[in-house]
Image (tube, helix red, strand yellow):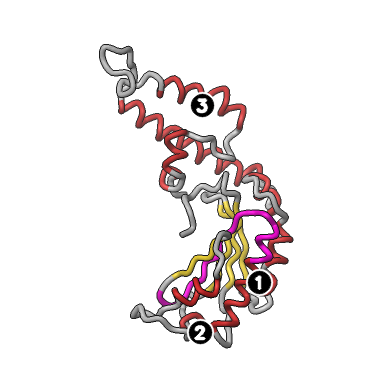
């Protein structure tokens, strides 16, 4: 498992916002008071002739401790509490939508391929749906599908991102994206960086596919999907 310190937002790390999977009682009664006590008595914050007690070494040890505690709680939740259902994962990260409703929104993509994989990404705090081995007759047909699922997902009032992997790059469609046609076409480039409408950049690419991320922006553990 990757260190959570590599994944969580720097702003969150500085403020030490509780991770969604950490027990709230333990956080409020044990860990948060310890954090507050050390932070308020750092020598760096209360320089001489103040009464600072704790060194930067102690602050570093605290950071590592909170990272480790977060990982432990997350592993415990994934291995012990999690019942195997997507709904259980959605509840854990407060993703306020229904798993089946998400799949219904993505039906235009699943109709085109049997290579569909959906799974919870515990470290990031998002639900992922991967579509591979999709073939389109032209770029406009692909854009039509993306516009369709984008509109349907927006109706769920959840946070989401769509990544389209082509031969040379990945194109990101966010829930705030408005002109999808323009975004896709302006980023549809061959390996030499030349603009093109050639659908083979998607159809023939070894690792091409469409990946959809469903999350709650308040509990997601990565900065963004750009």
Relative to 197, say whether 173 is above or below.
Answer: above
In magenta stretch: residue 156: yes
Q: Which residue is mark 2?
A: 199
Q: Earlier in the sequence, mark 1 or mark 2?
A: 1
**Residue at 35 percent of width and 32 percent of height:** 60
Q: Which residue is mark 1?
A: 148
Write down the region rendered in magenta.
151-168
Q: Position of residue 105 (x, y in %)?
A: 69, 66
Q: At numbered mark 1, what does the secondary structure look like: helix, strand or loop?
A: helix
Q: Quadrant of residue 77?
A: top right
| Image mark count | 3
**Residue at 51 percent of width and 26 percent of height:** 31
Q: Quadrant of residue 155?
A: bottom right
Q: Position of residue 164 (x, y in %)?
A: 51, 71
Mark drawn on residue 31: 3
Given this view, does label 2 or label 3 mark the residue nearer the observer? Answer: 2
Mark pair 2, 3: CA separation: 53 Å
Relative to 32, say whether 223 is above or below.
Answer: below
Q: Position of residue 135 (x, y in %)?
A: 57, 83
In magenta stretch: residue 48: no
Compare residues 210 and 190 and report the one nearer the observer. Answer: 190
Left or right of 56, for residue 208: right
């Amino acid at each position: 498992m990757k260190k959570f310190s590599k994944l969580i937002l720097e702003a969150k790390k500085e403020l030490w916002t509780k991770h969604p999977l950490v027990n709230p009682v333990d956080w409020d009664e044990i860990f948060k008071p310890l954090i507050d006590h050390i932070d308020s008595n750092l020598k760096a914050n209360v320089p001489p002739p103040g009464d600072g007690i704790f060194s930067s070494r102690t602050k570093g040890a605290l950071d590592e401790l909170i990272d480790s505690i977060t990982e432990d709680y997350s592993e415990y939740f994934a291995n012990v509490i999690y019942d195997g259902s997507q709904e259980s994962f959605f509840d854990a990260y407060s993703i306020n939508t229904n798993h089946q409703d998400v799949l219904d929104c993505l039906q235009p993509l699943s109709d085109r391929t049997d290579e569909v994989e959906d799974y919870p990404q515990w470290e990031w705090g998002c639900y992922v749906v991967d579509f591979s081995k999709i073939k389109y007759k032209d770029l406009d047909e692909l854009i039509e599908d993306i516009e369709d699922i984008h509109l349907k997902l927006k109706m769920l009032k959840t946070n989401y991102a769509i990544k389209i992997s082509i031969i040379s790059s990945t194109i990101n469609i966010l829930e705030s994206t408005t002109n999808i046609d323009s975004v896709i076409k302006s980023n549809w480039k061959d390996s030499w960086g030349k603009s093109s409408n050639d659908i083979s950049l998607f159809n023939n690419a070894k690792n091409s596919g469409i990946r959809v991320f469903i999350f709650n922006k308040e509990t997601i553990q990565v900065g963004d999907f750009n």
